[in-house]
Image (cartoon, rainbow, N blue to C red):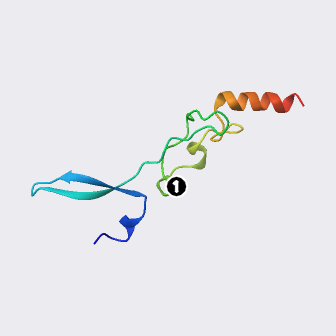
Amino acid sequence: MSEAKTKSRNFRKVCVRTVKGSKDAFKRKKPKIGSCSATGESLKGVMRALPGDLKGVPRSARRPSRPFGGVLSSRASRLEIKRRNRK
């Protein structure tokens, strides 16, 4: 029977070789790379970690501190800022 914490979908089953043979171990899944909500391309400068792993990291280091940082790519945010200023 597996432990209650390994039943969640945060963990994946990995076969590990030991001295006595192989056994199943549970490793935490790594989240997907963040993507731009407008274009779908991957975001640069955004940390790829689960929320619980970022406890000691300051908020300014988690994502870019520019407008639309962590939501839109640099190209899409540039176009959005231009669009908003032209109104």
Q: Residues within 10 Å of mark 1 (few under 14, many from 20)?
A: few
Q: Position of residue 72 (x, y in %)?
A: 66, 37
Question: What residue type is disc 1 on?
Answer: Pro
- The foreground one among 41 and 59 is 41
- Name the quadrant of the C terminus: top right
- The foreground one among 60 and 35 is 35
* 45 relative position to 69: left or right: left
On screen, residue 26 above or below 79: below
At numbered mark 1, what does the secondary structure look like: helix, strand or loop? helix
Q: What residue sits 9% from the left and 58% below the top? A: 20
* 37 relative position to 9: left or right: right
* 28 relative position to 16: left or right: right
On screen, residue 64 above or below 54: above
On screen, residue 41 above or below 26: above
Q: Hey, which quadrant is residue 21 in on the image?
A: bottom left
Q: Position of residue 39 (x, y in %)?
A: 64, 33
- Name the quadrant of the N terminus: bottom left
Q: What residue sits 55% from the left and 36% below the top? A: 45
Q: What residue sits 50% from the left and 52% below the top? A: 54
Q: Position of residue 71 (x, y in %)?
A: 65, 41
Q: Identify residue for label 1.
A: 51
On screen, residue 44 above or below 63: above
Q: What residue sits 49% from the left and 58% below the top? A: 52
Residue projecting furthest to the left: 20
